[in-house]
C-alpha cells in the first residue's frame, strides 16, 4: 500500500503546485493525523488517503469566481476518481470521502467516524501554535491586512462579523488583523475538537498564542 | 513646536498612504526613539522630526524600477524641503538630515550624533521580538516565501548569500523563509546597535525570537 500514498501525494502536489503553502499544510496535517491515530483503532488506509487528499480542491475553490465551489465537496469527488484509478480498495473509498466532506469547520456534514474526527482535528490544530501565528501573519501580508488592530473586540464583532457572509469572510479586510482572527476565531477552536489528544495539543498551542499576542501588544505599546 | 510634529506626521502618512504597514512602523519607531531618549541628552526636536520622516521615501524606493533610489538619501532631501516649508528651526535641519541619511543598515554614512544613533537603533529594534516575527511572516506572505525552510544554514549562505547583490536581496525568494532571515540577518543586529538601552531591549527580544523559531520547528516536526 505504501507506494499508493506516494502516488497520491504526487497527484496532490501537482494539483496544489501554484500554492506551495497548501502542500506544506497537507503534509503537516498528515503527520498530525498519524500522531492522533497512535494507539487508536483506526483504518490507517482511510486516514492516510483522506489526509493527503483533503485539500486537493483548495486551489480550484480559490480560483473560482462564482463562490459556489466548496473544496470539501469537490475534493471528495476528485478523491473518489483518483482512488478508483489507483485501484484503492473500493470499500474504503466511501469512508475517505466522508472524511473529506466533513473536514470543514462550517460544513453541515459533521464527522461521524474516528478517521473523520481525527482529520477534522488535525486540520484545525494546524491553525494554532507557532504555526498558527506564522500562517495568520502570512495571510495578513498577502491580503494587506494590518499587523495589529487595537480595537474593542465586542465592538469589532458587532460591526464586522454580525451579518457577515455565511462563509465567514469579514466585510472589510483592511480593518482586519491576526489578533482579531485570534480573538474571534482561533479561541473557539479547542472546544470544537473531537479527540482527547487533539484537545491537549490545542490547549498547549493556545497558551503559546495567548503569550505571543500579549507580548506583541506590549511591544507595540512600547512596554517591551 | 508640538503642532509641527502633527503636521509632519500627516505629510508622512499621505506619502506612505499606499503602505499602511510603513506608517505603523514609523509610529513604533517614533515611540521607541522617545523611550531610548529618556534620561539622555538629546535634541528632541531633531529626534522627533527625524523619526517621523526617516522612511518618507520608502514607497518611492519600492516603486522605483531603476534600483537607483535610496530612501535614506531621497528621504533626507524630502525632509529638508518639508521642514523648510514648515519653518522648522533652520539650524536643526542639517541634524535631522544626518539622522535620516545614517539610519540604513547598509549605508556608508554611519550615525555620528546621539540622535542619529538612537534612530538607527530604534529602527533596527522594530525587526526584533514579536513585532519582528509578525513583520517577517507578513513579508513572507506578500512575496510567497515558504513558512519554514529546513535547510543547512551554512550551505544556504554559501548558495544564496555569497555573491548576492550589495543591497542584500537574496537570489531566489522561493527558497527563502523567515527562519533563514532570522539566522542570517536578525541574529547579527544586537551587536551592531549603538546605545546601551537598545542593546538591552534587543537581547530580550532576541530571546523571544529564538524561542519562537525553536517552537515552530518542533511543531512542524510533529513534536509539539
Image (spheres, coloured by chain):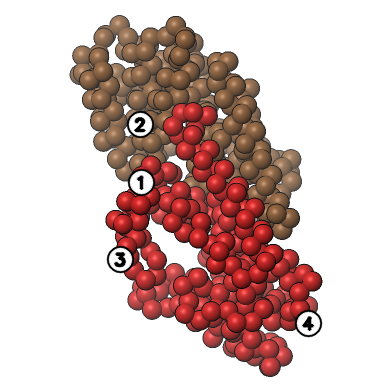
Chain colours: A brown, B red
Q: CA distance from mark 3 to mark 2?
A: 41 Å
Q: Nearer the viewer, mark 1 or mark 4?
A: 1
Same-subunit check for callouts 1 and 3:
yes
Q: Evaluate if marks 1 and 2 touch, with contact meaning CB atoms under 8 Å apart.
A: no
Mark 4 or mark 3, earlier in chain: 4
Q: Nearer the viewer, mark 4 or mark 2?
A: 4
Q: Residue at x 35, y 76 (%)?
A: B66
Q: Nearer the viewer, mark 1 or mark 2?
A: 1
Q: Secondary structure at mark 2?
A: loop
Q: In the rendered image, which quarter is residue A61 located in?
A: top left
Q: Residue at x 25, y 30 (%)?
A: A11
Q: Chain of mark 1?
A: B
Q: Secondary structure at mark 1?
A: loop
Q: Evaluate if marks 4 and 3 touch, with contact meaning CB atoms under 8 Å apart.
A: no
Can residue B197 be seen?
Answer: yes
As displayed, is residue B11 above or below residue A101? Answer: below
The C terminus of chain A: image quadrant: bottom right
As displayed, is residue A148 above or below residue A117? Answer: below
Q: CA distance from mark 4 to mark 2?
A: 59 Å
Mark 1 or mark 4, earlier in chain: 4
Q: Secondary structure at mark 3?
A: loop
Mark number for residue A57?
2
Q: Residues within 10 Å of mark 1 (few under 14, many from 20)?
A: few
Q: Residues within 10 Å of mark 3 (few under 14, many from 20)?
A: few
Q: Chain of mark 2?
A: A
Same-subunit check for callouts 4 and 2:
no
Mark 1 — residue? B152
Q: Nearer the viewer, mark 3 or mark 2?
A: 3
Mark 3 — residue? B163
Q: Chain of mark 3?
A: B
Same-subunit check for callouts 3 and 2:
no
> Residue A125, image x and y in percent?
52, 28
Amino acid at each position: 500500500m505504501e507506494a499508493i500514498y506516494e502516488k497520491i501525494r504526487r497527484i496532490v502536489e501537482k494539483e496544489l503546485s501554484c500554492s506551495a503553502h497548501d502542500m506544506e499544510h497537507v503534509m503537516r496535517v498528515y503527520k498530525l493525523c498519524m500522531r492522533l491515530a497512535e494507539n487508536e483503532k483506526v483504518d490507517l488506509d482511510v486516514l492516510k488517503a483522506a489526509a493527503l487528499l483533503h485539500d486537493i480542491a483548495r486551489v480550484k475553490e480559490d480560483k473560482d469566481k462564482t463562490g459556489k465551489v466548496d473544496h470539501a465537496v469537490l475534493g471528495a469527488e476528485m478523491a473518489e476518481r483518483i482512488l478508483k484509478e489507483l485501484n484503492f480498495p473500493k470499500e474504503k473509498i466511501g469512508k475517505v470521502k466522508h472524511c473529506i466532506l466533513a473536514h470543514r469547520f462550517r460544513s453541515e456534514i459533521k464527522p461521524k467516524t474516528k478517521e473523520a474526527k481525527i482529520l477534522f482535528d488535525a486540520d484545525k490544530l494546524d491553525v494554532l501554535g507557532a504555526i498558527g501565528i506564522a500562517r495568520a501573519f502570512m495571510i495578513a501580508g498577502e491580503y494587506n491586512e494590518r499587523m495589529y488592530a487595537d480595537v474593542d473586540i465586542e465592538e469589532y464583532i458587532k460591526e464586522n462579523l454580525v451579518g457577515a457572509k455565511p462563509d465567514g469572510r469579514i466585510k472589510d479586510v483592511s480593518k482586519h488583523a491576526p489578533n482579531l482572527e485570534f480573538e474571534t476565531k482561533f479561541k473557539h477552536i479547542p472546544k470544537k475538537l473531537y479527540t482527547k489528544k487533539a484537545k491537549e495539543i490545542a490547549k498547549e498551542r493556545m497558551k503559546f498564542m495567548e503569550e505571543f499576542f500579549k507580548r506583541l501588544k506590549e511591544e507595540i505599546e512600547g512596554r517591551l
